[in-house]
């Protein structure tokens, strides 16, 4: 069977009437797997082909109202890089896997510690002491087996950033040190790759998007970047803030892929203690 043949895909799909009365053709996961096995293709290739023919893989059906079929296909065809898969990056990873980003490269040299259990989505008691990128592969693949997870268990620096980031449509910043963040901004700029930055300190978190040519993090941190450690070292990392900020980061990654970044030269600041959400402009 040719999985790219619309008639063959249609035969494996079923009709579904949504709550809005609209009729959709959907492809259940077991049918995606069956088509992939018969055609000798990956399940991601089958999902992309289905969307091209107006058939929605059932797992992505709740996305379509906001993302659209073309948008979902673009996500499946995209590569995203995540640097740091701890409190922020781990949640960004799992969220993007659920959304259907087709290829996700993850870089982190660290192993889980007990202090990570309070907030890091990839960490559980059984994984304490294990490399974070191993958990990234296991858990994200369990969430969505169509997504390719590419682990890089090393610290990203000037010598290896270019090779790791190559081919990415966007990079998500899950780092903790300011020097590393500024290095990542330079590396992304050199490769013409947008960067979605996130950071937390206690119950306050922030997100901004840095497009190639922008110097947003320099404007944001200034000379503080030389100190490397910011307010997070004093205020800690409670469980709630990373979840919120990672969700905003993940959506902004999607926005960038779809060509509609919402936070370019704007900083979204959430203060969970005060219950406030504010934006400031760098223009």
Image: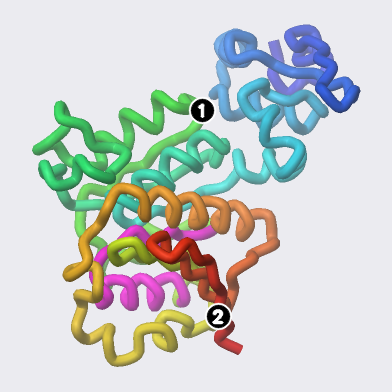
In this rendering, the answer to whether 78 lies above or below 45 is below
Picture quadrant of residue 179: bottom left
Q: Is residue 123 left or right of residue 6?
A: left
Q: Mark 1 falls on what kind of element?
A: loop
Q: Is residue 211 visible?
A: no
Residue pointed to by mark 2: 280
Q: Residue at x 30, y 50 (%)?
A: 87
Question: In the image, what residue occupies the spot 24% across and 75% down?
Answer: 230
Magenta stretch encompasses residue 18: no
Task: Specify whether 88 is left or right of 102.
Answer: left
Q: Which residues are magenta?
A: 170-189
Residue 236 — which label? none
The quadrant in which the C terminus is found is bottom right
**Dot 2 or dot 1, earlier in sequence:** 1
- Residue at figure coordinates x 37%, y 66% from the top left: 204
Residue identifier under label 1: 146
User: x, y percentage for residue 278?
Assistant: 54, 72
Tell me where residue 106 appears, x and y as whole percent.
34, 48
Of tags 2 and 1, the one toward the viewer is 2
Looking at the image, which residue is at 39% across and 44% down?
A: 91
In the displayed structure, does residue 32 sit left or right of residue 218?
Answer: right
């Amino acid at each position: 069977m040719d999985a790219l043949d619309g008639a063959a895909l249609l035969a494996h799909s079923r009709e579904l009437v949504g709550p809005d009365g609209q009729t959709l053709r959907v492809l259940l996961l077991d049918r995606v797997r069956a088509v992939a096995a018969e055609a000798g293709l990956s399940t991601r290739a089958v999902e992309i082909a289905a969307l091209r023919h107006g058939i929605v893989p059932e797992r992505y059906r709740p996305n379509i109202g906001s993302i659209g079929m073309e948008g979902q296909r673009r996500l499946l065809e995209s590569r995203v890089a995540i640097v740091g898969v701890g409190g922020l990056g781990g949640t960004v990873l799992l969220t993007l896997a659920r959304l259907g980003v087709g290829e996700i490269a993850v870089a982190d040299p660290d192993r889980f510690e007990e202090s990570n259990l309070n907030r890091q989505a990839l960490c559980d008691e059984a994984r304490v002491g294990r490399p974070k990128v191993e958990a990234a592969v296991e858990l994200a693949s369990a969430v969505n087996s169509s997504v390719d997870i590419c682990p890089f268990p090393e610290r990203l620096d000037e010598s290896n950033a270019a090779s790791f980031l190559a081919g990415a449509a966007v990079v998500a910043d899950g780092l903790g040190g300011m020097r590393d963040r500024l290095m990542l901004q330079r590396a992304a700029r050199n490769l013409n790759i947008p960067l979605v930055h996130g950071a937390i300190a206690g119950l306050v978190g922030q997100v901004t998007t840095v497009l190639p040519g922008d110097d947003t993090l320099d404007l944001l941190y200034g000379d503080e970047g030389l100190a490397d450690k910011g307010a997070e070292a004093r205020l800690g990392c409670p469980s709630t803030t990373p979840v919120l900020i990672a969700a905003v980061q993940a959506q902004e990654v999607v926005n960038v892929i779809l060509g509609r970044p919402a936070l370019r030269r704007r900083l979204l600041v959430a203060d969970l203690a005060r219950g406030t959400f504010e934006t400031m402009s760098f223009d």
